[in-house]
Structures are given as structure tokens and as C-alpha cells.
Image: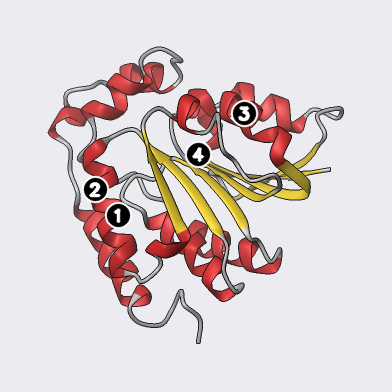
């Protein structure tokens, strides 16, 4: 049995995924597809955009959650950083891996206060709150300081326009062999061009339609 599949975390995740599937956002319905795409790629409007659609959970898929757990377990990760906590579904997968690795520290950042509060509730309910530091605020500030000397895994799942900026902040702390998972990376072409470049210092491949998996060389 693993922390991910056993109680209390396993049943909690099933419930949270069901809630996420049922969630709606009246504000999102008022935004056209073109406008949403433009705001998602903006470096100045991301706080407004994600604040307006705060009712949406925006979680990783079940498959991506399982992938995160497997990557963190296989690499014996002890120090993990996450950009974009939302309601904490991806956070729970990563924290479960740390628990099964014997412990560690997960730093995650979320700017929306209501999501921070709910994520903390879910982490307590899942029995992994002791492994996680939730930093409230804009990740460009919260992830600028006090990071571990060596980071084993970085998850990018916040404002897509900031993927490259967050990587720049965290990059000096990434150990050789560290894994970077970027969800919905297709919305960040600048980031993709960077990690796929031959001289970037990364080896990078697409996983399915929505995940870019990179390794620090």
C-alpha cells in the first residue's frame, strides 16, 4: 500500500477529483475563448484572469497526478517546488510521494486566498500537511527567496505565461537530473522553445497532449 492509494489520502483524492469535475465558473462563461487565450498568455493580466475564474479547480488530470507521484518516488525526491497550488490536488500527489520516500519538503505557491485556505484543509485531511509549505501570493515573489539548495522536482501548473520566469527563479537550485513537469505547456510557447533548445541545459519531451517533461542536465 502507498500513501497515495490508502486512506485517508486515496479516498480524499477520489472525492476531490469528483468535485473538480463538477465545478463551474460563471465568470469563465462570460469570457470568450479568444479573450481567455490572450489573457492566459499575458504577463500583466494573469492575476486578474485567474482571480476571475477562482471557482474553477484547474487540477492536473488523474494520469498526470499519478505521473507526478511516480516521478517523485522514482527519483527519491526530498525537495519539491510547485507553482500553482489551486485546491491542492497535485500537491497531495507530490506530498504522498515525499511521505513514501521517507519525508521531505514541498514548497507550493498560490496567489488566490480562497484556494490557499481550501488547499490547506485538503492537506490536513490527507495527513500530509506537515510536509508542505504553502506560500500565499504572487509566485514571482514567493519563490524568489528561501528555496532549498538542491531541488529534485519542479511542477509548473500556474499562470502559463510565467513558466519561463518561474524556471529562471528556481533554476539555480535545480540539481543535475532534476525533473521539471509543465502542465498545459502548449499555452507557453516561449517556455517550450527554451527547454527544447539544444543548448538549454535540459532534455525535454512531450507526454501526451498537455505535459512537457524535462530533465536538468
Distance, label 4 to label 1, CA atoms, is: 24 Å
* First of labels 3, 2 by sequence position: 2
> How packed is label 3: few (under 14 Cα within 10 Å), some, or many (20 or more)?
some
Q: Is residue 176 left or right of residue 57?
A: right
> How packed is label 2: few (under 14 Cα within 10 Å), some, or many (20 or more)?
some
Q: Which mark is residue 184?
A: 4
Q: Which mark is residue 32?
A: none
Evaluate whether residue 126 shows in this view: yes
The residue to which callout 3 is attached is 169
Task: Tell me what residue is drawn at x 50 percent, y 39 percent.
Answer: 184
Q: Secondary structure at mark 4?
A: loop
**Looking at the picture, how far across and down is residue 212, in whole percent?**
63, 42
Q: Which mark is residue 120?
A: 1
* First of labels 2, 4 by sequence position: 2
Task: Tell us which disc is closer to us: 2 or 4.
Answer: 2
Distance, label 1 to label 3, CA atoms, is: 24 Å
| Residue at the top extreme of this rendering | 44
Q: Are marks 1 and 2 in contact (CB under 8 Å)?
A: yes
Q: Are marks 1 and 3 in contact (CB under 8 Å)?
A: no
Amino acid at each position: 500500500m502507498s500513501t497515495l492509494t490508502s486512506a485517508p489520502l486515496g479516498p480524499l483524492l477520489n472525492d476531490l477529483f469528483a468535485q473538480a469535475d463538477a465545478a463551474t465558473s460563471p465568470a469563465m462563461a462570460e469570457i470568450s475563448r479568444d479573450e481567455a487565450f490572450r489573457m492566459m498568455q499575458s504577463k500583466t493580466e494573469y492575476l486578474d484572469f485567474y482571480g476571475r475564474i477562482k471557482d474553477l479547480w484547474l487540477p492536473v488530470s488523474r494520469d498526470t497526478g499519478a505521473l507526478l507521484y511516480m516521478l517523485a518516488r522514482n527519483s527519491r525526491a526530498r525537495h519539491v517546488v510547485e507553482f500553482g497550488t489551486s485546491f491542492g490536488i497535485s500537491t497531495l500527489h507530490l506530498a504522498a510521494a515525499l511521505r513514501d520516500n521517507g519525508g521531505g519538503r514541498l514548497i507550493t505557491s498560490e496567489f488566490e486566498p480562497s484556494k490557499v485556505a481550501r488547499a490547506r484543509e485538503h492537506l490536513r485531511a490527507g495527513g500530509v500537511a506537515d510536509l508542505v509549505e504553502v506560500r500565499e501570493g504572487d509566485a514571482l515573489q514567493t519563490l524568489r527567496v528561501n528555496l532549498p539548495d538542491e531541488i529534485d522536482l519542479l511542477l509548473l501548473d500556474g499562470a502559463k505565461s510565467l513558466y519561463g520566469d518561474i524556471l529562471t527563479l528556481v533554476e539555480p537550485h535545480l540539481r543535475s537530473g532534476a525533473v521539471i513537469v509543465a502542465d498545459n505547456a502548449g499555452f507557453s510557447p516561449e517556455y517550450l522553445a527554451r527547454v527544447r533548445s539544444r543548448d538549454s541545459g535540459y532534455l525535454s519531451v512531450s507526454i501526451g497532449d498537455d505535459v512537457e517533461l524535462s530533465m536538468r542536465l
